[in-house]
Image: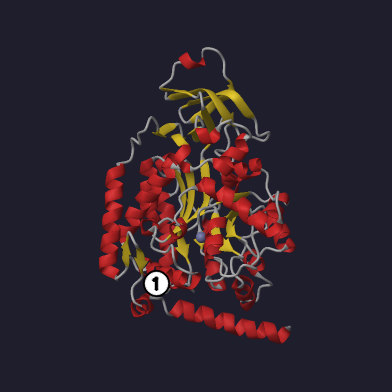
Amino acid sequence: MTRIVVHDAFVLTVDDRNRLFKRGTLVSEDGVIREVRKTHDGDATLDADHVIDGTGKLVLPGLVNAHAHLELTALIGAFSEFGVGELFATMTAVYNQLGRGEYDYLVKAGYELAALNFLVGGVTTTNSMDVRPTYGAEVFGEAGLRGVFGSTITDLFWDVPVDEQLQRARSFVETCHGSYGGRVRAAICPHDDWSVSRDLWERVARLADEYPTLPVHTHLLELDQSNTLARSYGAKDSLGLVEEVGLLDERLLAAHVRLADEEDIRRIANAGSGVAHCPSIFCYFNPDGSAPWTPVPELRGAGVATGLGLDDYYWHDSYDLFGEARQARLAANLKKGAKQFSSIELVRMLTIEGAEALGMDEEIGSLEPGKRADFLVLDVDKPKFTPLTNVPAQIVNNATSADVETVVVDGTVLMGEGTIPRLDTEAIRERATRAVERFCEETGWEIGIGGSDPPSTGKIVTDLPKRGPARLLARIATQSVKDELEF
Ligand SMILES: [Zn+2]
């Protein structure tokens, strides 16, 4: 039996009452939290494999990254200076090649780098939609982390044959779901409501029917075209299309829902679906300052579990999920006025609500007896946390991934006392560096300490998918004309 004791720590449970202990103890045994309570005299000498003196430390649940894509992690810094048009063109070209099976070395190196950076930053569970998720499942599984992975399915974004995509998705579920003691799970991942045709949504729904316990992870109501495309398929709107194919239910986790109006919020709440809010990516690449903003307070007010996600964090160069809570607050306050969130609400979004959106809140997301032992120990014995007041505010406004000292997942210490026993940090860094050098040699990208230059426009155009996007643009144009005539 493996036993871990943390004593004399500040402990923020994030349970239903948001209990906060000033001098608390957490005990886990064989991966399960057994006790969360006030510290008793003698806790320091309890018999355990790891006894952590929590003096000057803060214990909180592991963070849940509710929506991400991990494969291009090694390209951090390459997209930082781009506008939205250049970003979209260059990344579409890269993804098209990924879909064809290119750049596997970059994908593998990216997953390793992601696992390392998330681990040290306290992200213990990640929900990711990728092209080659099998590598991710292996890397995260070996690292000791928790992950939900799925294979991207879309027919209007790229030209990968649909049968092949569905086969990849099925094969991933069959081989990886439930592996590594259940820490690695599978999701069904239709990409979104603008690049997946109705025919494909229906095929995805049939696949999802075969695996009724898996979440369905997608992007909804992200772009102005979301509802336009749905109408072109005879549905009332985006949510109508998802509902008609039978996927608007409690299994659904939708990233963004930026355009959701009051009726959309009500429908998402009634369906019991979850939402992942990813504020940094939209703030960074927002093409239009007057664009609508994800109505997170309204969604949460209607009872929708809303987690936070880093999305494509290598486009805006931050692995820090704590920062996403601060960004959620700043963006909402700028748009709608102060006090859009309380600090504890943002802590809940970082932890228990992300878990709930993924259907995992019975197991993780809070520190309660019976739950899996996924928790962090932050060092708060620092000038920036002095004096330590309003712990929830310090977590979401002041803490960063650099304050994480110890990480425990499923009762295993993955980082502690300055070591990361399961990962060869230097080798991961070396492989990521070599992978980017090779990528530059093969593609004509120049990525260096002064910045980055993409390949020539001609090369990018050559690499872009053709058939899928041509169909997409034709549908949008036709439906837009119809909408104007009806109006
Ligand atoms: Zn995304």
Callout 1 environment at 10 Å: few (<14), some (14 to 19), or many (20+)? some
Residue 432 picture location, percent across and down: 31, 53
Lateral position of residue 435 relative to residue 73, left or right: left
Quarter location, residue 16? top right
Lateral position of residue 297 relative to residue 350, left or right: right
Query: What residue type is disc 1 on?
Result: Ala
Mark 1, secondary structure of its residue: helix
| Along the viewing direction, whichever of 151 and 386 lies nearer the viewer | 386
| Whether residue 278 can be seen here | no
Name the residue furthest top.
Answer: 42
Question: In the rendered view of the protein, which quadrant contains the N terminus?
Answer: top left
- Above or below for 314 versus 367: below
| Whether residue 318 can be seen here | yes
| Along the viewing direction, whichever of 197 and 61 lies nearer the viewer | 61
Determine the residue positioned at 67% across, 59% down: 335
From the image, tell me which residue sits under label 1.
Answer: 93
Question: In the rendered view of the protein, which quadrant contains the C terminus?
Answer: bottom right
Total marks placed: 1
Determine the residue positioned at 70% across, 48% down: 339
Query: What's the coloring here?
Result: secondary structure
| Along the viewing direction, whichever of 448 and 19 lies nearer the viewer | 448
- Above or below for 323 versus 422: below
Lateral position of residue 360 relative to residue 462, left or right: right
- Above or below for 202 versus 276: below
Quarter location, residue 243? bottom right
For ligand 1, tell me if the residue under mark 1 lies within 8 Å: no
Determine the residue positioned at 51% across, 16% down: 43
Residue 471 picture location, percent across and down: 50, 80
Residue 301 picture location, percent across and down: 72, 50
